[in-house]
Image (cartoon, rainbow, N blue to C red):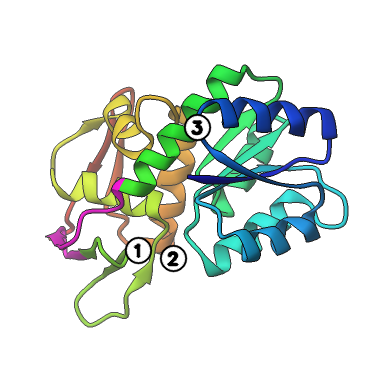
Amino acid sequence: MKILIVEDDLALSDVLAFTLRRAGFEIVTAYDGLAALAAWEQAQPDLVVLDLNLPKLDGLVVCRRIRAQSELPIIMLSVRGDDETVVMGLELGADDYIVKPFSPTQLVARVRAVLRRAMGGTPAGVLEAASLSLDRSRNEVSRPGEPPIRLTPLESRLLAALMLHPGRVLPAETLIGTVWGADGGDRTMLKQLVYRLRTKLAPDPAQHRPIETVPGVGYMLSDPA
């Protein structure tokens, strides 16, 4: 499988490339945002490892442009681990976020975890629960008489897990494992993902938001009916 590494620190880029080649991946590199977009179009990688702070175009812009056209898995790298920056990267569509410094073993594990989720995809078929209809093959959810709402793969996996068990409280750790797998995700990422999904399902806070928080436990899909 082919991985595009976008990192302007040449020494770190070489280390990342060496580490991932040893793990069996084919590697393409780019050192700024514009070169990253060109390499993405030309090389058609299976995953992008994307630094946040890049010359010419920063990583957030690159992530936004790729995500506007593709569901290609993206792992974002940054020395900035504050909640605001992590949330911004995830909201733009990054599948995972790794704070520097990190070990080569961690990088390989996170890459493999994200690729497993991407290769597994979202199971085909339609789920219906709580007045919602989720088309898992298209990552779209709708209500009767309303247009479909486009979801990211992470949002679709989260909603599918909740729709499979309507009215049942699912522990946060169970949802983290379902959405990100054993090698990625945490409670902060889950909280932000729930927030994004709630906002898509009900943009107006006065509307019923079917995903309920059960403090100290997890989340549940409820039906206003």
Q: Residue at x 44, y 29 (%)?
A: 184
Mark on residue 69? Answer: none
**Residue 79 visible in rendering:** no
Type of amino acid at the residue the image marks with label 1: Gln
Helix, strand or loop for disc 3: loop
Please report whichever mark, 1 or 3, sits nearer to the chain's N-terminal start. 3
Q: Quadrant of residue 200?
A: bottom left
Give the Cα separation between the discs numbered 1 and 3. Answer: 49 Å
Residue named by callout 2: 204
Q: Please rate how many residues cluster around mark 3, counting C-alpha atoms within 10 Å: few if below 14, some from 14 to 19, many from 20.
A: few
Whether 202 is drawn above or below 148: the answer is: above
Mark on residue 207? Answer: 1
Type of amino acid at the residue the image marks with label 3: Gly
Instruction: State if disc 3 and disc 2 touch (CB < 8 Å).
Output: no
Using residue 40 as the reference point, say whether residue 32 is left or right of it. Answer: right
| Residues rendered magenta in the picture | 120-133
**Residue 136 visible in rendering:** yes
Residue named by callout 3: 24
Q: Quadrant of the C terminus?
A: bottom left
Instruction: State if disc 1 and disc 2 touch (CB < 8 Å).
Output: yes
Please report whichever mark, 2 or 3, sits nearer to the chain's N-terminal start. 3
Q: Position of residue 128 (x, y in %)?
A: 13, 61
Select label 2 or label 3 by which is in front.
Answer: 3
Q: Position of residue 108 (x, y in %)?
A: 52, 26
Q: Residue at x 45, y 48 (%)?
A: 195
Q: Residue at x 17, y 55 (%)?
A: 223
Give the Cα separation between the discs numbered 2 and 1. Answer: 6 Å
Using residue 151 as the reference point, say whether residue 142 is left or right of it. Answer: left
Type of amino acid at the residue the image marks with label 2: Asp
Q: Residue at x 31, y 52 (%)?
A: 121
Whether 138 is drawn above or below 173: the answer is: below
